Amino acid sequence: MSHEAWTLHGQPTPGGVLIVSDHASAHVPADIELQISSELLDQHIAVDIGVAAIGVMLAQTPGIAAFQGGVSRLVCDCNRDEDAPGLIPLASDGHAIPGNALDDEGRAARIARFFMPYHAALADCLTADEPAFIVSLHSFTPALSSDPEQARPWHVGVLYNEDDRLARMAIPWLEGEAGLCVGDQQPYSGRLLNATMNRHAEAHGRRYIGLEVRQDLIGDEQGQAEWANRIGRLIAHLLQALPGKSQT
């Protein structure tokens, strides 16, 4: 199933897991001109590198589906509140986005075209097949152009806002998995950047976990396959650990 604003891979299952990736695509529709170098569309400011492939791999497992954004975050960042300036960014990591200098009518049209259908479809998907939990899957750049001295050593970050139920189970598992360096609310806090999960998980009492994988670890097929396998095993661990599940 797909729409200009989103794509669903796999079959959602009640009691299963839904992988949600707001920034899975670098696509810019032909009728939108951002007025930036095409090279920027391959970088972190445009797309969460690696997460689309991981989501597709995970969705091949029965009980797991992947809901992915269909356009670049530079066109419309669906992991923002509707009134947030960064929803249609004028700049990202030091790069100006001149084509996003829209008037009120242009901004409203962009929101109606991408943001609204994305969140409506995600809400419908979750309501129709209530999952055991959601995995909010993103990736982060090892270094920011605007702050190249900032250390970002984590292999993966675990993000959350008020609901840390799954995070508290996932962090020790990830730390014990091949000696990963795990960031608790790193490289940024889920209390600040958690709009999609605030809207679709926390507001409804749904369990979720936010995972941010470092992009250089999943920039090729081998890394993507390794992390799909790792996240799949984490999902299995969390499903087994949920209340009401037998411990083996």
Image (cartoon, grey):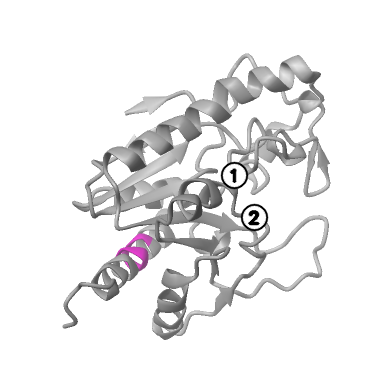
37 shown above or below 233: above
Q: Is-magenta flag for residue 10?
A: no
- Which numbered marker is on residue 43? none
Q: In this view, does 149 lie to the left or right of 30?
A: right
- Residue 172: image x %, image y %? 44, 83
Q: In this view, does 165 lie to the left or right of 125?
A: right
164 shown above or below 45: below
248 shown above or below 94: below
Q: Image quadrant for the N terminus?
A: top left
Q: Of the residues shown, which amino acid type is indicated by label 2?
A: Leu
At mark 1, the secondary structure is loop
Q: Of the residues shown, which amino acid type is indicated by label 1?
A: Asn
At mark 2, the secondary structure is loop
Which residue has dot 1 on it? 79
Mark 2 and mark 1: Cα distance apart in space: 8 Å
Crowd band around label 2 with a 10 angstrom C-alpha radius: few (<14), some (14–19), many (20+): some
Picture residue at 65% right of the left edge, 30% below the top: 75
Q: How many numbered marks, from 0 up? A: 2
- Residue 242: image x %, image y %? 29, 71
Picture residue at 41% right of the left edge, 57% below the top: 224
Q: In which quarter of the image is residue 42?
A: top right
Range of residues picked out in magenta: 228-232
Mark 2 vs 1, N-terminal side: 1
Which residue has dot 2 on it? 193
Picture residue at 71% right of the left edge, 33% below the top: 88
In front of the other: 108 or 68: 108
State whether the magenta stretch is mostly helix, strand or loop. helix
**Would you say the residues marked 2 and 1 are in contact, meaning their CB atoms lie under 8 Å apart?**
yes
In front of the other: 56 or 17: 17
The residue most toward the front is 204
